[in-house]
Amino acid sequence: MPASRSPATPWAADLAGLASHRLAALADPSKAPAMAAYMKTDMPFYGVQSGTRRQVVRELAARYQPTTQQQYRDGVLALWHLPHREEKYLALDYAVRFRNVARPPMLSLYRRLIVDGAWWDLVDEAAIRLVGHLWLEDRDAIESQMDRWIEHRDLWLRRSAIIGQIKHKAETDVERLFRYCLARAHETEFFIRKAIGWALREHAKTDADAVRSFLEAKEANLSGLSYREAAKHLT
């Protein structure tokens, strides 16, 4: 059951109103059907592409800079609750822009975005650029939660735990990455198998030998999709 929505504060309501007004002015209805078809969603699109959307993000960031965690949360959710897909993207862009306002208590907000978003275009941004950012800042707090997410019944939380370290490079907790991949290796779900291959392939850019050794030792455990994705750039 979706979480109940709290009424937006006047500040957050103004932020959301400006976002909708700007996107509507920039809308290209001729592009909207193809964008919705590509994302396999019934959610409406304005037809505003990412380059144009960045103009709106810059204006929102200049005019509505959150100074507290509560203001940050209110602003993100006010954007998130708007009906169009691009407004969801703005919520994530805004959350990333001001993520330094957030600390581990904001993990509950990011979890909500992941569970509500429930599709790769929304989930991956939240997992990598929001959860992943907190993960680097406070490993003990975040990793204890990721150990729960990797076993969670919600596949998007499991996917998030697998891909959350994708931008960590040399700071990746490699033991945990490999453990998470093996923990979900038995799954037939496409988005989990793809996540395993993606996370391993990205880490191979930092430590190819470690990933190669893991693949050699655990090939029998991994799906063909996961293995192929992971080994794509290994010789």
Image: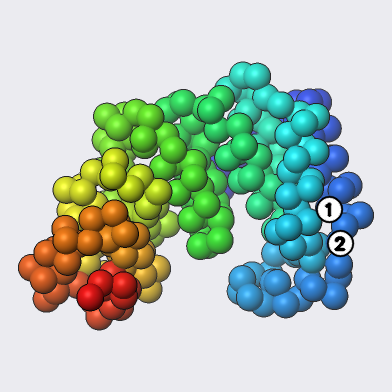
Residue type for callout 2: Ala
Left or right of 77 on screen, residue 102: left
Residue 180, quarter of picture: bottom left
Q: Is residue 196 above or below residue 73?
A: below
Q: Residue furthest bottom?
A: 224
Kind of element beneath mark 2: loop
Q: Quadrant of the C terminus?
A: bottom left
Q: Going 83% across and 32% down the picture, which residue do you hit?
A: 14
Q: Is residue 124 visible?
A: yes
Q: Residue furthest front?
A: 235
Q: Is residue 33 above or below residue 120?
A: below
Which of these two is toward me, 57 or 121? Answer: 57
Q: Residue furthest right?
A: 25
Q: Position of residue 85 (x, y in %)?
A: 70, 58
Kind of element beneath mark 1: helix
- How crowded pointer 2 is (Cα within 10 Å; few <14, some 14-19, many 20+) is rated as some
Residue type for callout 1: Leu
Between the residue at mark 2 and the residue at mark 1, the CA separation in whole angstroms equals 6 Å
Q: Position of residue 166 (x, y in %)?
A: 37, 52
Q: Which mark is residue 23?
A: 1
**Mark 2 touches mark 1? (CB < 8 Å):** yes
Q: Going 33% across and 48% down the picture, which residue do you hit?
A: 169
Q: Which residue is disc 2 drawn over?
A: 27
Q: Which mark is residue 52?
A: none
Which of these two is toward me, 166 or 88? Answer: 166
Left or right of 117 on screen, residue 230: left
Q: Is residue 158 visible?
A: no
Q: Going 22% across and 61% down the picture, which residue do you hit?
A: 208
- How crowded pointer 1 is (Cα within 10 Å; few <14, some 14-19, many 20+) is rated as many
Q: Position of residue 113 (x, y in %)?
A: 54, 46
Q: Position of residue 18 (x, y in %)?
A: 85, 40
